[in-house]
């Protein structure tokens, strides 16, 4: 998708601080961190929301989770962290390319806003 911010990051049209990468998944620092560690893990394929997942691409969620776990170990987040995926308006989604927020390095509160 030519007008998608995260596709531009995948295609290196916008510079970013890459944390990890493989064939299907990319992780980079959130530009507006909400915790000492705030990494976004995205599929390289353009999938707008979790509602657009289907039998052909569900497996990318596993790949995103695997990368998030590896990163959580790199950042020594064994005491805990939070994964967040926002979907559509009520979920508070701002960028319509699926992303997993990995937040850590401080105590999280509940319920979320
Ligand atoms: P969401 O509200 O779940 O769609 O989150 C979108 C996230 O993308 C926010 O946390 C933003 O701070 C982050 N973001 C927006 N632009 C960039 C960028 N150029 N590089 C890294 N993170 C970004
Ligand atoms: Zn995209």
Image (cartoon, rainbow, N blue to C red):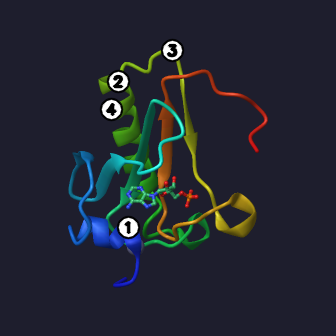
Badge 4 or badge 3: first in the primary sequence: 4
* 4 and 3 marks in contact (CB < 8 Å): no
Residue 93 at x, y percent in the picture? 61, 63
Residue 46 at x, y percent in the picture? 40, 73
In screen coordinates, is 100 left or right of 93?
left
Residue designated by label 1: 6
Q: How crowded is mark 4: few (under 14 residues within 10 Å), some or many (20 or more)?
A: few
Kindly report the distance in space between the C-alpha atoms of the residues bearing marks 2 and 4: 5 Å
Cβ of mark 3 under 8 Å from ligand 1: the answer is: no
Q: What element carries label 4?
A: helix
* 2 and 1 marks in contact (CB < 8 Å): no
Badge 3 or badge 2: first in the primary sequence: 2
Kindly report the distance in space between the C-alpha atoms of the residues bearing marks 3 and 1: 30 Å
**Image mark for residue 73:** 2
Residue designated by label 3: 79
Badge 2 or badge 1: first in the primary sequence: 1
Badge 4 or badge 1: first in the primary sequence: 1
Q: Nearer the viewer, residue 24 or 97?
A: 97
Residue 109 at x, y percent in the picture? 71, 28
Residue extending farthest front: 32
Q: In which quarter of the image is the N terminus?
A: bottom left
Cβ of mark 1 under 8 Å from ligand 2: the answer is: yes
Q: Residues within 10 Å of mark 2 (few under 14, many from 20)?
A: few
Which residue is located at x 26 percent, y 49 percent? 17
Q: What element carries label 2?
A: helix
* 3 and 2 marks in contact (CB < 8 Å): no
Kindly report the distance in space between the C-alpha atoms of the residues bearing marks 4 and 1: 21 Å
Q: Nearer the viewer, residue 32 or 24?
A: 32
Kindly report the distance in space between the C-alpha atoms of the residues bearing marks 4 and 3: 14 Å
Which of the 4 image quarters holds residue 45? bottom left
Q: In which quarter of the image is the C terminus?
A: top right
* 3 and 1 marks in contact (CB < 8 Å): no
């Amino acid at each position: 998708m030519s007008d998608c911010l995260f596709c531009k990051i995948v295609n290196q049209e916008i510079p970013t601080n890459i944390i990890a990468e493989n064939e299907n998944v990319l992780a980079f620092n959130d530009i507006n961190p909400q915790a000492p560690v705030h990494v976004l893990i995205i599929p390289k394929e353009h999938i707008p929301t979790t509602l657009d997942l289907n039998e052909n691409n569900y497996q990318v969620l596993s790949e995103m989770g695997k990368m998030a776990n590896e990163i959580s170990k790199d950042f020594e987040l064994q005491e805990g962290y939070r994964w967040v995926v926002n979907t559509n308006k009520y979920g508070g989604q701002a960028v319509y390319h699926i992303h997993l927020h990995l937040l850590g390095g401080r105590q999280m509160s509940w319920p979320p806003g």
